[in-house]
Image: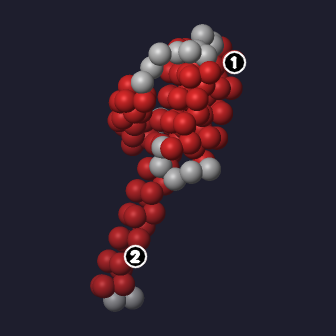
Amino acid sequence: MSEFDKREEGFEKKFALDEEQKFKAEARRDRLLGLWAAEKLGMSGEAAAAYAKEVVAADFGEAGEGGALRKVMGDFAAKNVAVTEQAIRGKMSELMAVAAAEVKAGK
């Protein structure tokens, strides 16, 4: 194997690891968002955990954060919870930083 091939293989492995960590961080962010939203919706305990799973599942169908965002916004609208899309997006950014740090730390 040439030096170039070894280097290429190293970049491919790094890319795969980065993508895996990104996927895990996004799923964790969505779970944390679900728990935050559940609290706003008056849920706790097992109901909140189940809702967080629904938020994670909503995001699997779409690339990016669209599914989770739409689910939370729709549920807030249905229950007349006054939280703007901008506030939800801000919370998602905040939670992404937390989730990425947790994934990187191996939690």
- Residue 78, image x, y percentages: 62, 21
Image quadrant where one finds the N terminus: bottom left
| Residue 104 figure quarter | top left
Residue shown at 42% from the left, 30% from the top: 85
| Residue 100 figure quarter | top left
As helix, strand or loop, the secondary structure at mark 1 comes to helix
**Residue 57 in view (yes/no):** yes
- Residue 65, image x, y percentages: 48, 43
Residue placed under numbered mark 2 in the picture: 9
Residue placed under numbered mark 1 in the picture: 46
- Residue 40, image x, y percentages: 53, 14
The CA distance from mark 2 to mark 1 is: 44 Å
In the rendered structure, the answer to whether residue 99 lies left or right of residue 56 reads: left
Near-viewer residue (30 or 1): 30
- Can you tell which mark lies on residue 21? none
Depicted 2 relative to depicted 18: above or below: below
The kind of residue on which mark 2 rests is Glu
Disc 2: CA contacts within 10 A as few (<14), some (14-19) or many (>=20): few
Number of numbered discs visible in the structure rendering: 2
**Residue 91 in view (yes/no):** no
- Tag nearer the camera, 2 or 1: 1
Near-viewer residue (9 or 60): 60
As helix, strand or loop, the secondary structure at mark 2 comes to helix
Near-viewer residue (97 or 16): 97
Residue shown at 61% from the left, 16% from the top: 79
Residue shown at 54% from the left, 36% from the top: 70
- Residue 23, image x, y percentages: 49, 50
Depicted 107 relative to depicted 43: above or below: below
Residue shown at 44% from the left, 50% from the top: 22
Q: Earlier in the sequence, mark 2 or mark 1?
A: 2
Depicted 100 relative to depicted 73: above or below: below
The kind of residue on which mark 1 rests is Glu
